Image: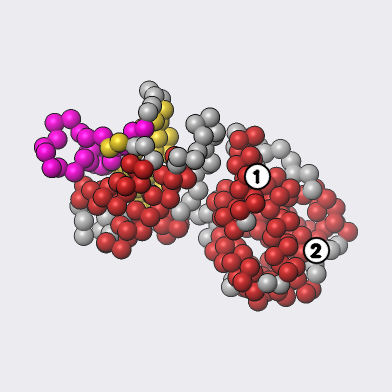
Amino acid sequence: MFERKEALALILKGCLATFEENGFKVSVPEGAPKGEPPVFEEDGSAYIEIKKNDLTVRLVSSGVTLDITEKSGDGEFAKSATNLMEMETLDEREIKSLCNEINDTVVSFYGKKSKKSAKKAPPTVSKSAVKSGMSYDPNTLASRIAGLYPELKAEYTRNFETYDDFLAEDFFVNHANAYIMETIRSGDNQKMKKLFKVLNELYENGTTDVQNLIVVTALGEIKNDAELLERCRKEITDDDFYETLAAVNKYLATPGGRRAAKKLENPPKYKPKKKKKGIMASMLQQGQTQ
């Protein structure tokens, strides 16, 4: 078992090259003895601090998480990403995994190719954060799908740069669905396995909004085609996932379902503070009453 300060020193060692390659310098606590790891300690937490021009980034270990926070100039720190870092069970393998995730985040958010004027992507939910009890969100689903189809990366970036938020319905209806359906219609085994590896994982560990996006917004495009549903069935690992997919497609084939599908063609403007019943639940409920 590692002490918090010791674990952060090992993480710094595994990420230092990436920090330096991307223009960051490591901050050293004032008065720190020579040879001591440059780890700050504050109110039961510990952190590494790196700086690049007026940008300050911290890797903050507190409780069972390692948060990446950032601020510009004299602004306030805001969280960019969260990873699981449970001190009681932390081992060298998990530290190496954390280093990989942090290196990926640094390159993705602050890499040499990124433009200072461009808005950064919303933070995604990592696999380690899901293990700690979090759920995948719509932005994480879209990011993973954009990773499968490089042609979608520009649209993914354009989405949050345009709206100052991420509008998942817009991204899938107007861009991602076409690529997803092309894969399913092709029947290519390798492409299907890659696609459903993502869909299975995020459906089983995602929020209700993520499940709605997968089953209704994206795979609702199957339009109850028996052959395409069978192709999906062979790749889907969760019974609930497939049963819900089949039920939604069956409903979308009804007159009421076709009217509901029309609404998906022009998604409503995103209203983050408004709580409403999920579209998938509404469709299934209406389907049961017909």
- Kindly tell me whether residue 205 is visible in this rendering: yes
Residue 55 in the image: x percent, y percent? Answer: 39, 30
Left or right of residue 191: residue 106: left
Mark 2 closeness class: few <14, some 14–19, many ≥20 residues within 10 Å: some
Rendering coords of residue 283 (x, y %): 75, 57
Which numbered disc covers residue 155? Answer: 1
Describe the element under mark 1 as helix, strand or loop.
helix
Q: Amino acid at mark 1?
A: Glu
Foreground residue, 227 or 204? 227
Within 10 Å of disc 1 (Cα), the crowding (few <14, some 14-19, many 20+) is some
Whether residue 40 is in magenta: the answer is: yes
- The answer to which of marks 2 and 1 sits earlier in the sequence is 1
Judge whether residue 41 is colored magenta.
yes
| Quadrant of the rendered image containing residue 163 | top right
Disc 2: which residue: 223
Q: Is residue 287 visible?
A: no
* Residue furthest left as drawn: 33
**Residue lying at 79% horizontally and 73% vertically, measured from the top left:** 226
Q: Position of residue 210 (x, y in %)?
A: 61, 54
Going by the image, does 189 lie left or right of 181?
left
Identify the image quadrant of the N terminus: bottom left
Residue 86 at x, y percent in the picture? 31, 55
Q: Is residue 249 left or right of residue 79?
A: right
Using the numbered discs, state the Cα–Cα distance from disc 2 to disc 1 in whole angstroms: 25 Å
* Callout 2 amino acid: Lys
Q: Where does the magenta region start and end? A: 27-52
